[in-house]
Image (cartoon, rainbow, N blue to C red):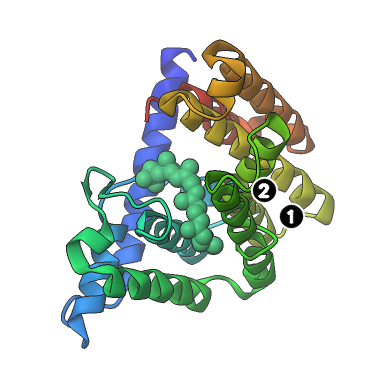
Amino acid sequence: MINLQQTQLMDYLAKSRLRVDTQLDALMPALDVYPELIHESMRYSIFAGGKRFRPALTLAAFDACGGQGDAALDTACALEMIHTYSLIHDDLPAMDDDDMRRGMPSNHKKFGEDMAILAGDALLTLAFYVMDERVVKDIALAIGSEGVVGGQVVDILLNKGVLSKDLKLMEFIHRYKTGALIAVSCLAGAKIAGASADTCARIKRYGEHIGLAFQIIDDVFDDENYAELLGVDKAREVAQGCVLNAKRELECLPKEQRGILELLADFVVQRDD
Ligand code: GRG
């Protein structure tokens, strides 16, 4: 990536983060709303940092498809709430049992397992309250038992030794556990912008490709799964292939409207966290 493009992407990510964080603050119950403890727990994890990659995709897909103004902003925030809920529940002792998240003690370490479960539940519920009605079904489908939850189930079965690790299984887990939320984040932006069914389908496929690449690069960082099965260099090569496939899907848009989505696809393989 040349420096000008890097600056353009960093500028876009900083602006979209500011919009999303300001709106999240407005949408989430304030700290002094009774019962204060749950709102503290929800806000703790939402404002613990994070790249805000999923809402950035929603806003970029919305812009790329000709959307105007803030019509996709609440849905972008809803997708970050769902992502944060998934991280809180993923960290629980019954799941990955992680003590740290986003550089801070994980939610259950700070608030206890009871509040962490409820903070996740409340974030998920609030997300459905604030999102655009036109994308409720898409998002529900993407994160349920035939989406993110399904991917998590297969991952648990793998970790329990019920299933054995191979590329086909890893691709399934990555496409569902990580890719489904990334893909629907893209689709939501396109749909709210009023894009045609064909464009929506291609923007969703763009999201599926970068979702797979995103998780393969996480594997490279952690030296597991794809990196363990293929080696780091080959895993990076596969992720780069996904990015090329993703960019091909953008050919449905006028060239001058593809820029940020192309840069976000490159970001997936070039990021360092
Ligand atoms: C149905 C959404 C949902 C959750 C219930 C717990 C669970 C089922 C699923 C786990 C999903 C999960 C945690 C997938 C990993 C996704 C992933 C790559 C997380 C890291 O994303 P980044 O790097 O994190 O974007 P930041 O902190 O930058 O936002």
Q: Position of residue 190 (x, y in %)?
A: 67, 53
Query: 88 and 43: which one is in front?
Result: 88
The residue lying at 21 percent from left, 59 percent from top is 109
The residue lying at 63 percent from left, 34 percent from top is 165
Q: Is residue 47 above or below residue 113?
A: above
Q: Quadrant of the C terminus?
A: top left
> Going from the N terminus, do you reach mark 1 or mark 2 first?
2
Q: Which residue is mark 1?
A: 195
Q: Position of residue 115 (x, y in %)?
A: 28, 74
For residue 241, side relative to residue 110 (left or right): right
State the image quarter where residue 33 is shown: bottom left
> Would you say the beta carbon of the disc 2 residue lies within 8 angstroms of ligand 1?
no
| Residue type marked 1 | Ala
Residue ranking furthest to the front: 161
Q: Position of residue 32 (x, y in %)?
A: 16, 81
Q: Is residue 186 above or below residue 22?
A: above
Are the two marked residues, 1 and 2, in contact with CB atoms closer than 8 angstroms? yes
| Residue type marked 2 | Cys
For residue 59, side relative to residue 126 (left or right): right
| Residue 271 is at least partly visible in this image | no
Q: CA distance from mark 1 to mark 2?
A: 6 Å
Q: Which residue is mark 2?
A: 65
| Residue 152 is at least partly visible in this image | yes
The residue lying at 42 percent from left, 22 percent from top is 6
Residue ranking furthest to the bottom: 34
Q: Secondary structure at mark 1?
A: loop
